[in-house]
Image (tube, grey):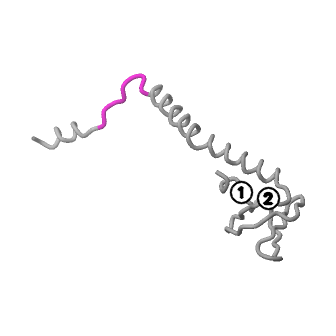
Amino acid sequence: MNLSMVLLQAAPQAPAQGGGMMMWVMLLLVFGVMWLFMIRPQRKQQKELEKFRNELKKGDKVVTVGGIYGTVVDIQDRTVLIKVDGETKLRVDKNSLVKDFTVTQQQ
């Protein structure tokens, strides 16, 4: 086998006619699957977390991003005062509250 035959066989083939349309269909399909399995559930989770933070009330048991468990004592516009142990209280930002663990304990 000579060198010219090897180079001709290794040369890229010309794309088939209409291949560009198939590429766009596959791209749209990939984006659709990503939206369905990644973006949509994340938006739903963010809405639930926002609803949880807006519906906080005194006596709710919460967990902060840092893993501190406490009970809500006072609520202001952007901050929440939580009682952690005995008379120890912490003022935290509402955005640092991630979970209501009273719901998971009852199930």
**2 or 1: tag closer to the N-terminus:** 2
The residue singled out by tag 2 in the image is 60
Tell me which residue sits at (36%, 29%) in the image.
15
Looking at the rendered structure, the secondary structure element under dot 1 is: helix
Q: Was residue 28 drawn as part of the magenta stretch in this picture?
A: no
Image coordinates for residue 44, horizontal then vertical, percent = 67, 43
Discs 2, 1 touching: Cβ within 8 Å = yes
Residue 61: quarter of image: bottom right
Provide the residue designation for mark 1.
Answer: 102
Residue 43, x across and y down, in percent: 67, 44
Outermost residue, bottom side: 87
Residue nearest the viewer, comparing 80 with 71? 71
x 82%, y 63%: residue: 72
Q: Residues within 10 Å of mark 1 (few under 14, many from 20)?
A: few
Residue 103: percent from the left, percent from the top?
70, 53
Label 2 sits on a secondary structure element that is loop
Q: Which image quarter: residue 91?
A: bottom right
- Residue range in magenta is 12-19
Residue reaching furthest front? Answer: 106
Q: Is residue 2 positioned above or below 97 on the image?
A: above
Relative vertical location of residue 29 with respect to residue 71 in this rendering, above or below: above
Q: How many marks?
A: 2
Q: x, y (%) of residue 47?
A: 73, 45
Residue at the image point whose x is 76% and y is 51% from the top: 52
Hey, what amino acid is under mark 1?
A: Thr
Q: Quadrant of the N terminus?
A: top left
Query: Within the magenta stretch, is there residue 17?
Result: yes
